[in-house]
Image (cartoon, rainbow, N blue to C red):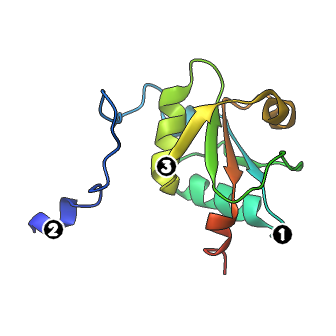
Amino acid sequence: QASAHHTSTHSKARSKPAPKAPAVSPAETNVAVLNGTETTGLAHHISADLQQSGYSQAQPLNGRPPGSGQVTVVQYASGHQAEAEGVAHSLEVNRVQPLESAVASLAGSANVVVIVGADKGATVP
């Protein structure tokens, strides 16, 4: 029974613990999913995963952000880091960073943007 709660053994070196309950509920979080790879349908697949996790506003968007697209990154608009951390936790993504202007131009009104990298491409059937 004790082994059921050992999923987060790789803790991050941060001064504050990751929030278990974000200030904004997943259903209220406006998430855009961008495909940073050449793999067709990856943004749709990841946004569907997020919707199943309660992020009902997760939407795949067209447009490819600049960069190599090797590692999945969750970016957030100013003041939305807690929501981004929640999305990252849901997707088992370790990289969370402020929204880059090149990505913001593709993300529309989203507060949190997932840029799907090649590391998630291997999980698509």
In the image, 106 versus 67, the foreground residue is: 67
Contact between labelled residues 3 and 2, with CB atoms less than 8 Å apart: no
Q: Indicate the position of residue 113 as horizontal and vertical percent values.
A: 68, 39
Closer to the camera: disc 1 or disc 3? Answer: 3
Contact between labelled residues 1 and 2, with CB atoms less than 8 Å apart: no
Q: Which mark is residue 3?
A: 2
Q: Quadrant of residue 40?
A: bottom right
* Dot 2 crowding, Cα within 10 Å, few <14, some 14–19, many 20+: few
Which residue position is annotated with label 3? Answer: 94
Residue 121 vs 90, above or below: the answer is: below
Q: Which mark is residue 40?
A: 1
Mark sitting earlier along the chain (2/3): 2
The Cα–Cα distance between marks 2 and 1, rounded to whole angstroms, is 37 Å
13 relative position to 26: left or right = left
Q: Quadrant of residue 6?
A: bottom left
Please name the amino acid that badge 1 sits on: Thr
Count how many numbered circles sit on residues in the image.
3
* Dot 1 crowding, Cα within 10 Å, few <14, some 14–19, many 20+: few
Q: Indicate the position of residue 106 as horizontal and vertical percent values.
A: 86, 37
Secondary structure of residue under mark 2? helix
The Cα–Cα distance between marks 2 and 3, rounded to whole angstroms, is 23 Å
The Cα–Cα distance between marks 1 and 3, rounded to whole angstroms, is 23 Å
Direction right: furthest residue:
63
Which residue occupies 20% across, 59% down? 5
